[in-house]
Amino acid sequence: MEKGMIHLPRLPHIGMRIIKSALGVMICFAIYFLRGKEGTPFYSALAVLWCIQNQSKNTVQNALQRTVGTGIGALYGLIYILIKGQIKGIGDGFLHYFIISMVLIPIIYTTVVLKQKKASYFSCVVFLSIVVNHLMDENPYIFVANRSLDTLIGIFVGLILNSIYIHGRIDRETLFIADLDKSMDDSMGGVTSFGKIRIGGMLEKGMKLTFMTLRTPAGFLEGMPDVKPVLPVIAMDGAILYDIKENRYPKVYIISARHANSIEDFIKERGFNIFTTIILDDVLIIYYDELINPAETDIYDKLHKSPYRNYLNKERPKEHPVVYMMCIDKTEKIERLVQEIEESDVYSELKILSYPSDDYKGYSYIKIYNKNASVQNMADYVKTMTGASQIVTMSDNRRNKADFVSSDCNTLVRKLHYMFNWSPRRSSANNINLLHHASDV
């Protein structure tokens, strides 16, 4: 950084929700003039601002709920002003406002009985707009009709704007694969709200998007709880393909039971505990022995309470094949174990990853998979499964090769969004990179 230079903070860009909100209010005012200045555009503007959302998911359902809410509020409002017109003692004093407040109870309860809880806001708004602002010299039926129409105009303007996609032709032919492991780490604050909302919007519009992760399915679900990809996730560095929606594993690369037995014996003879993962009837089970070092104990304490993991402190049934094995110990011990495995007879048909732990200083991991377990192979499988024309990869780890790499989650998601909407297609199936940084059992 040069001396004397002032670096201003980067400001967020103006998003489509902001633009649509302003446009929606302008349309409501235009309709007000087209109606000959009949009604009150304030209520139309209020409704359209409430209806404009980041995502258009369930837009029609939400509009129907708000329409129902408008009807409920209008009905109660009409009943109240008709009764008030007959009882002169209510007047405009505190009793008037006390009754209004109490009537909100049956209004909200009505939305609950009709199973339209999300409509309660609009029911109350419409009711209050009628009974608080009603001028007694107006025809109550016309007044209620105008207030209801004002709100309905805003609702349906919002519905239309939410349904309009302003960008150009979107790319539903390319398979996009994103690695957000680094962003999901607690130390990084997790995936940003912006990232989750933008990803959700792209998935809603039919984007062929999945994720590659070194984590287990449990680790991914915990790291991205608000994102539900339609396509299966490439997990555990390509060892398994996990379908979140169906909670099943459509593709798994396994180590045979016989070979797994030999590997376990080899490692245990050298004094290591092994976390051994198997999949039995679409249930992921992790077997382990006695925990022998602080890193193992801490990992277990943090993860075993998760509803996504099933730990068993017992010996793995010898007839079950294995998805992967993991050990964590002092770095020098792990390095020696890796060397001994690579020089032994058990090394055939294996893929071994070994890297230092970011969370436990002086400790390293060793993870053992079937040699065919790779992100590349799984990506090709998903490409064939979806009929995609090509693959585009993105990663938040600058040490890894991908079509686009950025350590900033928001920057990566913006690039993903841009390519989904604007970028020319390009082949990149050979650029998928192995990821070596997550620390999830």
Image (cartoon, grey):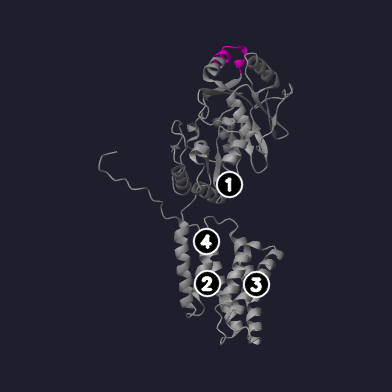
Tell me, yes or no, whether the highlighted magenta stretch contains residue 346.
yes
Question: Considering only order in the chain, which callout, 4 or 2, is on the residue closer to the N terminus?
Answer: 2
**For numbered disc 3, what is the local secondary structure?**
helix
Q: Which x, y percent locates residue 326?
A: 61, 24
Q: Which x, y percent locates residue 229?
A: 59, 44
4 vs 1, front mark = 1
Q: Amino acid at mark 3?
A: Met
Q: CA distance from mark 1 to mark 3?
A: 37 Å
Tell me, yes or no, whether the highlighted magenta stretch contains residue 225.
no
**For numbered disc 4, what is the local secondary structure?**
loop
Q: Is residue 180 found left or right of 346 in the rendered image?
A: left
Residue appearing at x 65%, y 75% in the figure:
76
Q: How crowded is the residue under tag 4: few (<14 C-alpha within 10 Å), some, or many (20+)?
A: many
Mark 3 vs 4: CB contact within 8 A: no
Q: Which residue is mark 2?
A: 43
Residue appearing at x 46%, y 57% in the figure:
16
Q: Is residue 141 above or below residue 307?
A: below
Q: CA distance from mark 3 to mark 2?
A: 23 Å
Q: Which residue is mark 3?
A: 102
Mark 3 vs 2: CB contact within 8 A: no
Res 52 label: 4
The residues colored magenta run: 338-348
Q: Which residue is mark 1?
A: 226
